[in-house]
Amino acid sequence: QTSNNMATLSLLPQAVVGMILLSSLSLCWAFQASPTTHSLSAAPPRCLTRISPPVINSKSKIYSPSAPGRSSLQRMSNDEDSESKSGKSSTSVKFFELDDAFEDDGDNVVGAKFFGGSTVKEELYVPEEEEMALQLQNVDPKDETEYKRFEDENAFDTLGKRVGESLQAAINEILYNDEPGRGDIASWKEGPSLTWETPFAKSKTSGGVSPLNELEASKLFYNKLDVAILSAKTVESDVVEVRWDIGAVWPNPWESRVLLTGTSLLTIKEDSNNNSLLLVKQVDQLDGSNPTDIVGSLSSQLSPRFWDVYHIGMTPSSEIDPRFTQLSSSQLAFSSSKNIKGKKGLLSSYKLSYLPSRLVTEPSLIDTNGRSGRTAQALPNHGFTTAIKTMGPNKESFTPVTPIEVSISKAEGFEGSLVKWTVPVPPEFASKAVLPLPLTESCVDDEEEEEDVDSLATASEQNKSPYSSRQPKIPPPKAPQSLQCSYSLRPSRLVATLPYAGNPQDEAVTQLRRQLYQEVVERDGFAPKLDPVTKRPIFFFWMNDSKACFTRAGGLGMAVYEWRGDWSKSNEVGIELEL
């Protein structure tokens, strides 16, 4: 009996190996036999990565192969099946063979290549398709296709423009080795008796009295350092208040990405003869309840985040738009807090947050497809200004930012709803003086738009699943109207939010809006901020499970949509309140 037991135990490893092989073969067959179409309204896979923006050439200016103005999603397709059915090469993304992905050569764990590994990513790299992505028509440096930050009067006044341009040019020369400013930009100098009050630590090597020398010393410590001057307003004849964003990649194993926001009061002297600005005094303050607590501002951003670890290898660590939360309105850290009449209750289910001013990009459109169209669920194609090469020898580094904000309101003068996305711009990209604007519908002819709708209907017919007797009866979505995109300096905001696990156009969002209004406005007495056009409360949706990816050279070039369990309730429904 003992020998029989030993024989049985010796067969167990073989049985386990056999079960693993059978499971691997079944999974491979499931991938090959799966339908070739993914719907936006269907449950998403573990990650949906936008192939964005689509290729735009002289013959075609289709915003999306799935729906005009909608985002394209990566589709798994079998190349041979697609070519045999269409009779010509398919325009969908090629999928790689899975047969060798589950092989165990003794060094690799079975299936580990799919969890953030780079091996399969190299197999996905196709030089021809990468070159096609580079055919994306980058905007030309013309007045109507670019945003000149320092000419925005909402962010810079006359003196503020001179100070902002000069200081940003000096910073960029240190951080990015940019060329010195043009002749019309004043040179930035620091006075010999400069006074500098700051919460930032001062190194002994730089002397501790020069902000620019300290910046150069900090560049050697961090894996990456970015500084952007967002606005500058004159306080007195020789004093300017400057708002800035500082982004850094911390030198730890998981490379935490931190974002610090704040203001500086600069006392300057102008030398018009030499076209220079002399810094006499600088006082820095951080946003938040304690303007000098640099340790507290950093510590909350250094620990690894759960979803970044869960989706490891998908993108670098994300830069999170700062939110300062407090228990009651009397503890909110901004100058106008005394004017707020509301007070959050102890048992309130919503979260009250203060958001500092940020530079944002805001694509928008008029949608007539309603909830079923799911237009608000992904960034539109006309919001992108470049394409990002994520693989190959010339792959680009990029900065992911989150969340992506969506607001849906009534469209005045149009049939349908106004859908607007708000994406914070990282300081790496915001540090440029001129930002590219994406192509909008003014660049698309009416005839081409009609062709896009016809091609959409044809594509819908071709993508019918051969493995299901049910054929789609839903008509193709209508093309959106009034495609626009712009940059703006978003003012500071006070918001209240409730957690939610779904998407922006779910029916349950309407109930959450009603609950939020009842708790925040009717019960706790806060005043809602009204839309200047519709005169209605401003509601919004935070997609915390989405990341917008920027490069310094081109701007917004990719969006990543993560899978997150419903139990996490990671997204949020919010209402904007009066400050």
Image (cartoon, rainbow, N blue to C red):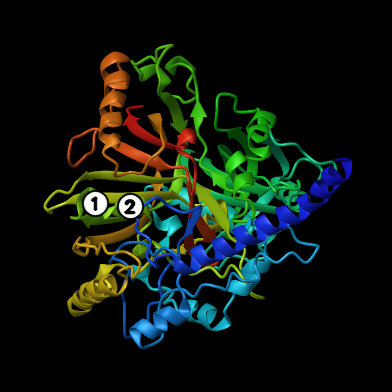
Secondary structure category for the residue under label 2: loop
Could you say which disc has been placed on residue 415 in the image?
Answer: none
Q: Is residue 17 visible?
A: yes
**CA gap, disc 1 and disc 2:** 8 Å
Q: Which residue in the structure is indicated by mark 1? A: 372
Q: Tell me which corner region of the image, top left, top right, bottom left or bottom right, holds residue 125.
A: bottom right
For this orientation, the residue located farthest to the bottom is 87
How crowded pointer 1 is (Cα within 10 Å; few <14, some 14-19, many 20+) is rated as: few
Q: Are marks 1 and 2 in contact (CB under 8 Å)?
A: yes
> Of label 1 and label 2, which has the lower sequence position?
2
- Label 2: few (<14), some (14–19) or many (≥20) C-alpha neighbours in 10 Å: some
Residue drawn 41% across the image and 57% down it: 151
**Seen in the image, is 90 located left or right of residue 312?**
left
How far across and down, in percent of the image, does residue 473 sit? 19, 62
On the rendered image, what quadrant is the N terminus found in?
A: top right
Q: Residue at x 35, y 46 (%)?
A: 406
Which of the labelled discs sits on residue 41, or is there none?
A: 2
Amino acid tagged 2: Ser
Mark yes or no: residue 179 visible. no
In this view, the residue farthest toward the front is 1
Could you tell me the amino acid type at mark 1? Ser
Q: Position of residue 186 (x, y in %)?
A: 56, 59
User: Would you place residue 408 above or below residue 118 in this image?
Assistant: above
Residue 471 appears in which quarter of the rendering?
Answer: bottom left
User: Is residue 150 or residue 115 the one in the foreground?
Assistant: 115
Place of residue 508 in the rendered image (x, y in percent of width and height, measured from the top left): 29, 35
Q: Secondary structure at mark 1?
A: helix
Q: Is residue 536 above or below residue 76?
A: above
The quarter in which the C terminus is drawn is: top left
Image point (40%, 16%), residue name: 348
